[in-house]
Image: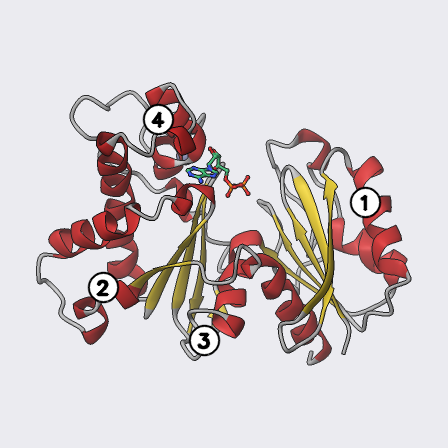
Amino acid sequence: MRLGALEAGGTKMVCAIGDETGTIYEQVSIPTTTPEETVPKLIEYFQDKEIAALGIATFGPVDVNPASPSYGRILDTPKLPWRQYPLLDTLKAALHIPMKLDTDVNGSCLGEMTYGSAKGLDSVMYITIGTGVGVGIAIGGRLVHGMLHPEAGHILITPAAGDENRCICPYHTSCLEGLAAGPSIEKRWGAKAVDLVDKAEVWELESEYLAQAIMDFILTVSPQRIILGGGVMHQMQLFPLIRRKVSEKINGYIRTPELADMDSYIVPASLNDDQGILGCIRLAELSLQE
Ligand code: ADP
Ligand code: ZN
């Protein structure tokens, strides 16, 4: 069955056609500028593709409650032209097929649970560390929405000695995104993260902040596995550092088979950066079952 996938990001819109086995037939990328310019191109791409349904994973904040009158509307995003833009309704009015929408990180979480390294698990966290930090959460097989949707990239972090005034988040004085996302690394060290590979202190500090957050996530959500994706996590040397620091912070307080096998518990994204698109394919399939 042909299914459409739209991963709506702040810099680009990835559009793809695939099927429920997780095969992707084709994929294009369209720059994200304004809704007036970008959305007609999305519609043009999907309209003659003979897809049965469309799954959408989008930047936020966004209304993800299917029962809400503004389901699929972008809310008060810093990307000003997209504020209050009815993304889902506009696509539905043009394409007339079933659709299901969630956050970008919930989409990636779902992709990993359906086709990737979290297959068979029902309580999973997906954390992306890139331009920002985002967290997708599934508990008992359901993507968590709650009041709005999790925004766990902005949880408060204790800064390391000497790193007290480094948070670049405009909203918070000491949050994970403001201290650990790619732009924060670049500002603190004066070089792009990818050019800091040989500086051990960069990854020591980065892994400390991520481990603080992950410790809190483990104790709050009790996920069966944690998947780390996004550009910054291409630095594979972070994984052993994070695993060790998480174990040290938990300090034996809880003991589970999962925590005893950290190499299988905290893992990289497994789908070649297609986890978001594949999550959209699954959302499309789910929209047909509703
Ligand atoms: P986005 O979050 O915008 O979807 P990415 O996940 O690619 O995109 O994140 C981009 C950020 O990740 C940038 O700040 C960039 O410096 C950083 N980044 C990208 N590739 C790497 C890499 N190989 N190593 C370290 N940092 C990287
Ligand atoms: Zn913040």
Q: Can you give x and y, in whole percent of width and height, for residue 117 in the image?
A: 42, 69
Q: Is residue 255 above or below residue 176?
A: below
Q: Secondary structure at mark 4?
A: loop
Q: Secondary structure at mark 2?
A: helix
Sequence order check, earlier mark of 3 and 2: 3
Q: Are marks 2 and 4 in contact (CB under 8 Å)?
A: no
Of residues 259 and 92, the one drawn nearer to the viewer in this rendering: 259
Q: Residue at x 60, y 65 (%)?
A: 278
Q: Are marks 3 and 2 in contact (CB under 8 Å)?
A: no
**Disc 2 target residue:** 262
**Disc 4 target residue:** 167
**Disc 3 target residue:** 119
Q: Secondary structure at mark 1?
A: helix
State left or right for residue 227 relative to residue 210: right
Q: Is residue 261 above or below residue 178?
A: below
State left or right for residue 10 relative to residue 174: right
The quarter holding residue 220 reads: bottom left
Of residues 84 and 19, the one drawn nearer to the viewer in this rendering: 19
Q: Residue at x 69, y 78 (%)?
A: 290
Amino acid type, mark 1: Val
Amino acid type, mark 3: Lys
